[in-house]
Amino acid sequence: MIGEMFYWVLSMSVLGGAVILILLAMRRLRRFPRRFIYLMWAAPAIRLLIPVGLPSRYSLLSLFSGSVLKSVDIGKTGGFMDLTASNLIQAADQYFPFSYKSDLLRRIFEGAGLIWLTAACLAAAAAIYLYRRGMSDTGERTEVMPGICRSDKVRHPAVYGILRPVILIPKDLPDTECRYVIRHEQAHMRRKDNLFRLAAVLIACIHWFNPLIWISLKYFFEDMEISCDEIVMKELLPEEQKEYASAILGCAKSKSPFVSAFGGAGLRQRIESILSYRKMTALSALLCAAWTAAVLFVLLANAPA
């Protein structure tokens, strides 16, 4: 059972890694808004969590011969809706029931699966420990408005918490910077970025053996922050945009993967993005949305069986 579970995880990790590489290449398009790139991160996340998908001849997997093992019938509504599962590893003959190509492969995956599960549990335990330690070290809070508090121990403005998030601001943060900080952190809260951060960390714990996952975390968090910057920048005047950039420079980087920090994640890239920011026209936004939807479809669809 553990061996079969690890086989699925390894297969998802290989395919998810390929999707990550494609997404990292797309990030090189400097003029493409980060809020759309941020949406595209759903593709590797889904690939790393769900082993099956709907078939399409336009799928990225159509480029790989023999990458799909079989279709799984999940219903009939005037026709068949099939799900396909990728088999890039090619160590199994079938999935339902699961059958390896040899008994040696079965034993290898059983042993590797035990190592994987042990390390994944340890990684999750470490993540929980770091989260609890970070939450317990926020000091005394003074509420300045609903959902927003000042703290004497917090060094970086950030959203803390998962189920009931709250914006924590350093006690000595100047009022001139507070309004920009609050706008930025409220954008995180509206998008539920704290939950997406949690999901990203959990995915990293599951796929701990894949270095591309850890590399992608850095860029995912960076795109999360820059896309929030873009949301705030839409509402600011040109002179306010410069003040916003100065406020970011005044905040140190956050080291925690569990908080959406105002001054964290790719400080240089964020400043460059702010200084080069241009408001999008309705047509440009529509074209970017259509391109994003097309990319997500191609990356999430499986090749026909």
Image: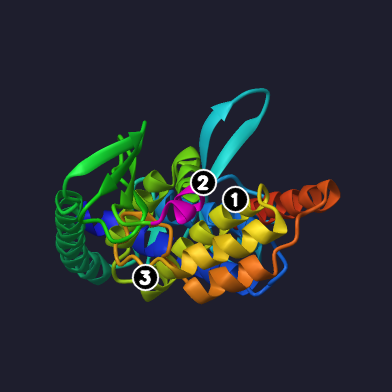
Mark 3 and mark 1 lie on one chain; the one further toward the N terminus is 3
**Can residue 4 be found in the magenta stretch?**
no
Residue type for callout 1? Val
Task: Locate residue 250: give its quadrant.
Answer: bottom left
Query: Element at badge 2?
Result: helix
Q: Position of residue 163 (x, y in %)?
A: 30, 36
Nearer to us: label 3 or label 2:
2
**Can residue 176 be found in the magenta stretch?**
yes
Furthest-right residue in view?
A: 283
The reply to whether discs 2 and 1 touch (Cβ–Cβ < 8 Å) is yes
Q: Position of residue 237 (x, y in %)?
A: 70, 53
Query: Element at badge 1?
Result: helix
Residue type for callout 3? Trp
Q: Position of residue 50 (x, y in %)?
A: 43, 48
Query: Which residue is rendered at x = 36% and y = 31% of the image?
Result: 146
What residue is disc 1 on?
A: 232
Residue 247's disc is none
> Would residue 27 be visible to someone looking at this image?
no
Residue 183's disc is 2
Task: Locate residue 57: give its quadrant.
Answer: bottom right
Spatial CA distance of label 3 from label 2 is 29 Å
Give the dominant element type of the magenta stretch: helix, strand or loop. helix
- In depth, the one of 117 and 217 nearer the eye is 217
Q: Reply above or below: 23 against 75.
A: below
Badge 3: few (under 14), some or many (20 or more) residues near its Cα, within 10 Å? some
Task: Locate residue 269: give its quadrant.
Answer: bottom right
- The magenta segment: 174-181
Badge 2: few (under 14), some or many (20 or more) residues near its Cα, within 10 Å? some
What residue is disc 3 on?
A: 214
Residue type for callout 2? Arg
Query: Which residue is rendered at x = 68% and y = 23% of the image?
Result: 78
